[in-house]
Amino acid sequence: MLHRPSRLSKALKPYWRNWELYVLIAPAIAYFIIFEYIPMYGLQIAFKNFIATQGIWGSPWIGFDHFERFFNSYFFWRLIKNTIGISLYQLAIGFPAPIILALMINEVRQKHFKRFVQTVTYAPHFLSTVVLVGMILIFLSPSTGLVNQVIKLFGGDPVFFMTEPGWFKSIYVWSGVWQSMGWSSIIYLAALAGIDPQLHEAAKVDGATRLQRIWHVNIPGIMPTIVILLILNSGSLMAVGFEKVFLMQNDLNMEASDVIATYVYRAGILGAQYSFAAAVGLFNSIINFILLVLVNKAARRLNETSLW
């Protein structure tokens, strides 16, 4: 009598067949479970008056009081304006920059020059945030900075870049573009390498110029990659990096540099208002999640490419 495989063994068969791949990704899965999902247990303090001696479970529930306090606070609109302003500025400048760089590098035919350009543009990615901000402070120093020395050379007065709120967003965004543009272009170069060369040959036969081939062959070929990365970037629109903003921030540029991440640090770490800081952070994460879903839905309708 033949033994019929159980329903469970049938369900597990594809996993056993590829068990090596699952072992390979097991550390990454474990990382996200341990450091990303399990800590979500602590989100409940956003709805409690957290008292350390009573613990998370023992602290009393207060509902949405912390959220109401944040929405009615003096800093609310300044934080939203700065966070969204920096994020949109960064998205508008920083997102197309690696695409343009990848398209330019892809057109270089001299191998040694191509490798040189790639090395030079990739290198800033490996600088730490502290080193990058230190370089910014040195270059933009009003007394000894290279930029102000050039301004003085042409008869201008030194500019106090790091203390004037109007300069903060531009310095933050353009320095970030310089640091990450080369590294971010790698994924686009990989997508360009996957385009069928016969498409370019056919375009040449039809008399297409190099610019026309870039516009009608290369860009459509990497469009799915562009859409996916745009969705991911839009999903982190409210997540302006804390470290760089904090290091560039001072009392004089606080009007333009104060974002949700730095406010959470001041309220939660310095002010020991853990429940309030958790509520602000949760609000930020919910907005990011909503943006991710909306942009993904719009991309699926317009371009039939989406995360899910």
Image (spheres, rainbow, N blue to C red):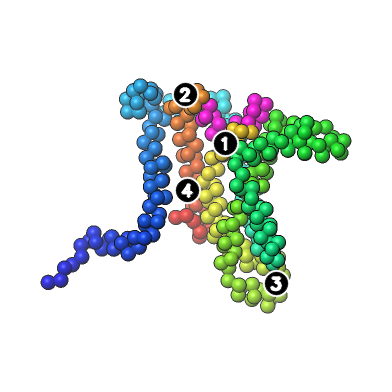
Residue wearing tag 2: 272
- Mark 1 or 4: in front is 1
Q: Quadrant of residue 239?
A: top right
Q: Nearer the viewer, residue 171 or 88?
A: 171
Q: Residues within 10 Å of mark 3 (few under 14, many from 20)?
A: some
Q: Which residue is mark 4?
A: 293
Q: Main secondary structure of the magenta part?
A: helix
Amino acid on which disc 1 is placed: Glu
Q: Return the disc, 3 or 2, that comes first in the chain's sequence.
A: 3
Residue sitting at x 62%, y 67%: 217
Instruction: Return the residue at label 1.
Output: 243
Q: Which residues are magenta?
A: 249-266
Q: Are marks 1 and 4 in contact (CB under 8 Å)?
A: no
Q: How busy is the neighbourhood of tag 2: few (under 14 within 10 Å), some, or many (20 plus)? A: few
Q: Is residue 166 visible?
A: no
How far separated are the C-alphas under marks 3 and 2? 64 Å
Query: The residue tagged with tag 1: helix, strand or loop?
Result: helix
Of badges 4 and 3, nearer the viewer stands: 3
Residue 27 is inside the magenta segment: no
The mark that comes first in sequence, 4 or 3, is 3
Three-letter code for the amino acid on which mark 3 is drawn: Ala
